[in-house]
């Protein structure tokens, strides 16, 4: 499995948010680390098909994701930031809604929803409304949603934002457990989010890849 990002450029008017980003990812966990404004959201939006690159391409196993279209979105799981949750849904109801949006077969959704709720430790509150959930529970539900359709590529946007240290550790452990056999991309500005989980750290700033290092190399340089 391989995801190749080749010379990706994104301009917003005169502002160049991505300046020719190139990197090839294989199975493993990647920290996409950079300060606000680095271009992380822009990149994730292009990957998920929500935004068109100005130029450059992304290839999944050698095929342009633009040409793969729905087929590529089928192997991609995306965990957005918390705003994306609907407070009046129950946890199970939210997952059922997300399954329908993804065109998952009813039978498969029925089987997968309890599985993922159990994986993220939310079985007991499956019927509770999201508005009653803590920040950590909401993050875990968003992870459940992202892995519902058993994606090959898992993209997580600031997965521990707004959490206390204990919850952060729980989320990191959960990500490690879910990572087997996948390409996992964790976008964050928080070093501790990725230093214990990621195999490789991609440092991005002002739309450019500053460094591509193993976790050991990064830890040694801090
Ligand atoms: P990050 O997610 O790392 O915070 P973004 O991808 O959101 O970075 O932003 C990268 C740069 O592009 C920033 O300078 C940001 O202000 C700018 N930008 C993002 N979206 C837009 C937009 N829709 N219009 C203009 N500039 C944008
Ligand atoms: P994030 O924290 O995920 O980077 P932001 O809060 O920066 O997201 O951006 C929220 C939305 O505003 C995004 O859709 C982004 O593309 C857009 N945006 C960011 N910066 C600008 C900008 N300078 N001009 C216009 N839109 C922007």
Image: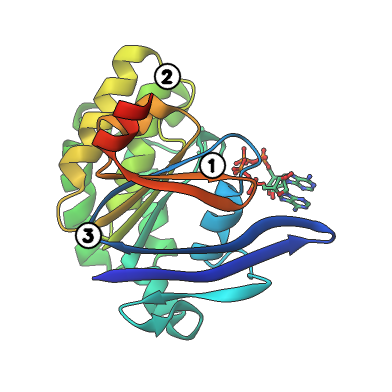
- Which residue is rendered at x = 58% and y = 34% of the image? 35
Q: Is residue 115 above or below residue 215?
A: below
Q: How dense is the environment of label 1, judged by Cα within 10 Å: few (below 14), some, or many (20 and up)?
A: few
Q: Foreground: 74 or 172?
A: 172
Q: Earlier in the sequence, mark 3 or mark 2?
A: 3
Q: Foreground: 46 or 56?
A: 56
The residue pinned by badge 3 equals: 27
Q: Are marks 3 and 1 in contact (CB under 8 Å)?
A: no
Q: How dense is the environment of label 2, judged by Cα within 10 Å: few (below 14), some, or many (20 and up)?
A: some
Q: Earlier in the sequence, mark 2 or mark 1?
A: 1
Tag nearer the camera, 3 or 2: 3
The answer to which quarter of the image holds residue 5 is bottom left
Q: How dense is the environment of label 3, judged by Cα within 10 Å: few (below 14), some, or many (20 and up)?
A: some
- Which residue is rendered at x = 64% and y = 66% of the image? 9
Asked whether residue 133 appears in the rendered view, the answer is: no
Q: CA distance from mark 3 to mark 1?
A: 27 Å
Task: Give the residue furthest to the front.
Answer: 221
Estimate the x, y position of residue 51 in percent, counting from the top left: 63, 65
Q: CA distance from mark 3 to mark 2?
A: 28 Å
**Left or right side of 158 for 3:** left
- Which residue is rendered at x = 29% and y = 70% of the image? 2
Estimate the x, y position of residue 150 in percent, counting from the top left: 23, 59
The residue pinned by badge 1 equals: 84
Q: Are marks 3 and 2 in contact (CB under 8 Å)?
A: no
Q: Is residue 121 above or below residue 95?
A: above
Rendered image: mark on residue 163? 2
Asked whether residue 186 appears in the rendered view, the answer is: yes
The answer to which quarter of the image holds residue 129 is top left
- Which quadrant of the rendered structure holds the N terminus? bottom left
Estimate the x, y position of residue 93 in percent, counting from the top left: 37, 45
């Amino acid at each position: 499995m391989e995801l190749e990002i080749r010379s990706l450029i994104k301009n917003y008017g005169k502002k160049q948010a991505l300046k020719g980003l190139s990197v090839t990812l294989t199975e493993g966990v990647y920290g996409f680390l950079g300060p606000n404004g680095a271009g992380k959201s822009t990149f994730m939006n292009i990957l998920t098909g929500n935004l068109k690159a100005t130029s450059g391409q992304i290839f999944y196993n050698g095929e342009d994701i633009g040409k793969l279209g729905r087929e590529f979105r089928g192997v991609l799981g995306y965990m957005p930031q918390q705003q994306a949750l609907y407070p009046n849904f129950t946890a199970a109801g939210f997952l059922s809604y997300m399954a329908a949006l993804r065109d998952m077969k009813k039978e498969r959704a029925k089987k997968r929803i309890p599985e993922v709720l159990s994986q993220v430790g939310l079985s007991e509150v499956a019927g509770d409304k999201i508005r009653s959930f803590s920040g950590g529970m909401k993050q875990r539900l968003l992870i459940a949603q992202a892995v519902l359709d058993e994606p090959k590529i898992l993209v997580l946007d600031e997965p521990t934002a707004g959490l206390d240290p204990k919850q952060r550790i729980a989320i990191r452990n959960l990500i490690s457990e879910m990572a087997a056999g996948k390409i996992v991309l964790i976008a964050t500005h928080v070093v501790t989010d990725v230093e214990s989980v990621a195999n490789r750290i991609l440092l991005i700033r002002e739309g450019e890849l500053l460094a591509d290092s193993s976790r050991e190399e990064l830890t040694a340089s801090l």
